[in-house]
Image (cartoon, rainbow, N blue to C red):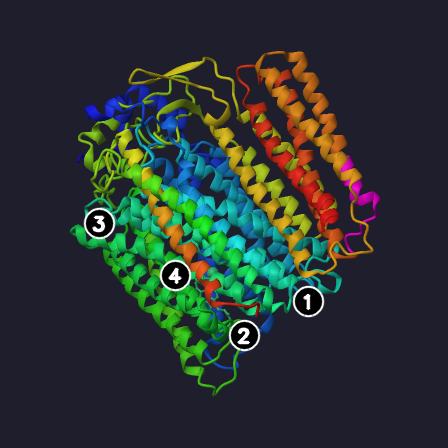
Amino acid sequence: MKEDRQHSDEFHERHERIWLMFLPPFIWAVHLLACYLTAAIWCAKHVGMESGFMTVRVAIGVYTAVAVAVMGWFGWIGFRRHRHLSQDLSPDDDTPLDRYRFLGLATFLLSALSIIATLFVAAVALFIGNCD
Amino acid sequence: MESLPATTNSAANSESEPEIAPSAARLLKAWETPRGWRYWSAVNNSEVGLWYTVTSFAFFLFGGVLALLMRIQLAVPGNTFLTADQYNQIFTMHGSVMMFLFAVPIFEAFSIMVLPEMLGARDLPFPRLSAYGYFSFLIGGIFVCGSLFFGAAPKGGWFMYPPLTSAFQDGVGADIWLLGLTFIEIASIAAAIELIVGVLKCRPPGMRINLIPLYCWYILVVAGMILFAFPPLIAGDILLEMERAFDWPFFDPKRGGDPVLWQHLFWIFGHPEVYIVFLPSIALMAMMIPTFARTPMVGYSWVVLSAVGTGFLSFGLWVHHMFTTGLPGISIGIFSAASQAVAIPTGVQIFCFLATLTAGNVKRSVCLLFIFAGLATFIIGGLTGVMVAVAPFDFQAHDTFFIVGHLHYVLIGGTIFPIMAAFYYFFPLVTGKQLSERVGTIVFWLVLIGFNVAFFPMHILGLLGMPRRVFTYPAGMGLDLWNLISSIGAFVLAAGFVVFLIDVFRPRRQQALSERNPWQAGTLEWLAEMPDQPWGVRSIPVINSRYPLWEQPGFVNDVDEARFYLPDAEEGKRETIVSSVIDATPIQCLRVGGPTFLTFFAALFTGGFFIFATYHWWWPAILSGVIACGVILRWVWTGTAWIPEKENKDVGLGVSLPLYLSGPQAVGWWAMFITMTADVTAFMSLVFGYFFYWTIHDDYPPEPLPGPGVFWPVTGMLLLLVAYGLTLLARHWNRRDFGARFYLLLSLAALFTVGGTGALLAGPWLTGLDPTEHVYPAVVWVLVGWTALHAVLGVVMQLYCLARRAAGRMTARYDADIVNVALYWHFLALTVVITVGVIAGFPSVS
Ligand code: HEM
Ligand SMILES: [Cu+2]
């Protein structure tokens, strides 16, 4: 208790940005749309250009690298916040520190899920090499 | 844990009335439910929520009767019970009623009813908005269902694919679907706004974001999904209705349109819809399971993760309904992969539930039976779902009865069973009495057996090749027996519901009241007394745990003895506490609206607009729309942003809170923000349409069509941006209390807005774009029309603020009106810039 009184300003809600936890899944959505639109527009506009499809695969590769890097970074921030000042797993109490650690955990878990989902989508580009 | 002895009826109540504390009497008086015919002017969440729930359940029964008619028809080969045309109307109405009039509304209805109780709040922030939403839903629902009795119902299937519904169906059926359901979708969005603001801003002091009941997380997720899923459908409805009513060729390939655009817009809504329907049921389980396991939910954070994760991922799946439209393999692959990923969070939730059930010692009850049945059925439905998400299998099963079997396992397992469980669980909260466990067990077995007998054979029928949506089939193809079995099952299922209804509606005068908190739950809604009082809670408590009734000693007593916040209503006004989003620190004592008929009339005339428009009676439609606007203006004028008689109010425990807030702390600001998010989503769907047509045409904008040009659109944009700047300045000078400057700038702003709107419309008008000629002019006109309509609304708001200040209802200190209007204008400016960038900018770069 003493400890979090000390930190009570550090964990004040005005420093908290709750939408940060929604950013990783948001990036997943942007990545999905980018892949889909790139492929769809390419296939609609360059019908029959088999050889050029490599461009699409490379583009998807680049999107994926960027997306995973950003999400990984968020995940790491979340993880560090969750481990802040305490090792136990579940932040279930009513102190500002618990809320801080809970939001960290939520960000971390959502990043992990988003990374998995992103890789799922990216894997498709590995297996499919043309427009039909 | 405190539990009061069950008191018997009214006699005891009237005796104790004289002893009631003066503060409690004042509180009761402020929250009193109107009597007699005025009862229908009530806006309190407990009344509106109850009407809403009962109405949506009634629509469920209606949809169920339609299902039985279909099963009678299909029971034997070559049956003539229904004609093909009747069958088409009935399956369309069955699907539409179940999805739009039952599954989504019942979640919102039920949440409106219990959310304040879960938060220990007196009411939701906008009770009148809930009432408006309810009446819109009621009127729209009756209109849509009523069409069936005149043989005029829609018959294009619940997803209304054009060109079937544009070029090949005369009559008003499809119009009824498009306009009636748009009306209902608007009501759904209204309720979603109410619920989001409720969860974010009306929590009891101390209920930090990591302590809110899991149900509230699901409300946030589902209501958020409604905000992003319904607008694309509304955009699609607009396009299709424009084609039907005015021959704008959005889906007509001969003039450059494409029916696939409808499929995109529909399924961007339609797949999330499945989760919008199913997550609330998971939410109900998340409330009931800890109670029956007598232990907190295992893995709170993990459940939150899966709720949020499912909400997001479910938007990435829409294309899997379009696998058979000839998309490129890579697109199919991308969405197939995304469809498999959503299984992860879904699995996590179910795993947490099972872990909770095994961690605690479970108490047997009908609720729990339904929960188990729901989980099992849903898992089976999920498995067949993963099967059809695999593209090659879908090519095979698409449009057969296999799909019908699959979707009912998901929908009935995922929604109906948990909802039945919730009926048993929450019944005492609403009526003060319990449902019978003995009858409940019979209901359960009838429903479970009937359901499986009805729907399992459909998978086999599908694999045998029976298509869905056919009104009959020839004998001797191996389909006869399975169909007969399925129909018998449907009637057993129906029998279960009949027994259930008898138990619900039988008179209960004799039955003793239930004890308080009959299931010994740990969450706030079970503070309710039996029968419940209109005030919600006696005093608004301070929370420091997830299950206060279990973990905070003496809690119920402290609430009852008014030891917490707002135990009184000194001024006789309806008040509740508004708190901060993250840590729920109290920041305002909010006064909410009381009973009124305005909301009813507002809904009636809004409905009139949509209903007359269905029949293309334009003048009555416009008249009705204008009256609706008038009523809504009156409601907003008299019912929002009241200037309080004093700055602060003492809410108890030595805390004094402001009575008026404006800007991002205020609930009204949040409502505007959320509404505009949905609005921009609809707009972006139209912009998506513009670019969609670009992808399918080599020549776009098509050569001989001159397009709106650059001059007029850019002029319009500049004028509107000046108006935007002036509006912001007016807000500034109002705050400084420079009245003259405020009036001058805002009047100028209104003039500029009118001018800008005219210039914007002049673009396509003067360049002679004819929207019936080709899809390009049509889509330009739609974008311009949308923007112009919003600009007109912007003028109305500017004039409103002028009038407010002149009438002394807005001042330098009490400036919520102009602050919210400025917020609206941020979004309007964005819309203008995008519209002009697209219609004037894109043709010059492409
Ligand atoms: C209560 C028992 C129910 C029965 C016996 C039943 C029966 C049926 C049948 C036989 C069909 C197929 C019509 C055809 O393709 O020829 C169907 C379609 C459908 N049902 Fe149900 N149903 C029931 C409950 C529900 C529920 C609770 C929901 C949703 C929450 C639902 C949603 C749908 C939808 C969306 C369709 C597709 C309609 C279309 O093809 O346009 N049903 N139902
Ligand atoms: Cu789907």
* Amino acid type shown at disc 2: Phe
Q: Earlier in the sequence, mark 1 or mark 2?
A: 1
Circle 3 is placed at which residue position? B292
* Residue B263 visible somewhere in the drawing: no
Q: Earlier in the sequence, mark 4 or mark 2?
A: 4
Circle 4 is placed at which residue position? B412
Mark 1 vs mark 2, CA separation in Å: 19 Å
Q: Residues within 10 Å of mark 3 (few under 14, many from 20)?
A: many
Q: Is mark 3 within 8 Å of ligand 1?
A: no
Q: Which numbered dot is residue B168?
A: 1
Is residue B762 rendered magenta in the image?
Answer: yes
Q: What chain does mark 3 sit on?
A: B
* Amino acid type shown at disc 4: Ile
Mark 4 vs mark 3, CA separation in Å: 22 Å
Q: Is mark 4 within 8 Å of ligand 1?
A: yes
Q: Residue at x 53, y 71 (%)?
A: B469
Mark 3 vs mark 1, CA separation in Å: 54 Å
The quadrant of the image that shows the N terminus of chain B is: top left
For the residues labelled 4 and 3, say whether their Cβ atoms are less than 8 Å apart: no
Q: Name the secondary structure under disc 3.
A: helix
Q: Earlier in the sequence, mark 3 or mark 2?
A: 3
